[in-house]
Image (tube, rainbow, N blue to C red):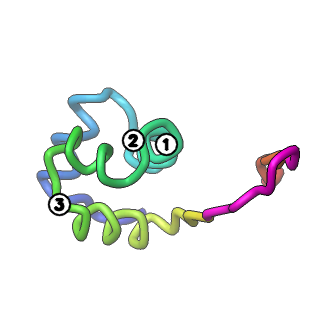
Amino acid sequence: MMRKTKLMQSVEAKYNKPLEKLLPELYNEKGLPAMAAELGISKGTLWYWLLKFGINVRRVALAPGEEIQVSQAKR
């Protein structure tokens, strides 16, 4: 288990959710700049957190009419 800073712990307490779950959800809903602003941290800090927690961020460009399906790997 990774040690969390006081800032990380305060964000978890505010959202009542572990960062490992919160960060991917917020990224998908808001995108990086708005997410950093909402959390009250810099984009650099946010990228560091994503890296530290092993959260993969993928960007995809789709042509008109194309679709994408995302599924979770079974653990």
Q: Is residue 56 above or below residue 62?
A: below
Residue plotted at (31% across, 71% down): 48
Q: Which residue was labeled with disc 1?
A: 21
Q: Residue furthest front?
A: 64
Between discs 2 and 3, the one toward the N terminus: 2
Looking at the image, is mark 3 or mark 1 earlier in the sequence? Answer: 1
Relative placement, left or right, of 34 versus 18 is left
Q: CA distance from mark 2 to mark 3?
A: 19 Å
Residue under numbered circle 2? 18
Which of 25/32 is in front? 32
Label 2 element class: loop
Name the image quarter holding the N terminus.
bottom left
Q: Percent from the top left, x then y, of residue 60?
A: 68, 61
- Looking at the rendered structure, the kind of residue marked 3 is Ser
The residue beneath circle 3 is 42
Q: Which residues are magenta?
A: 59-66
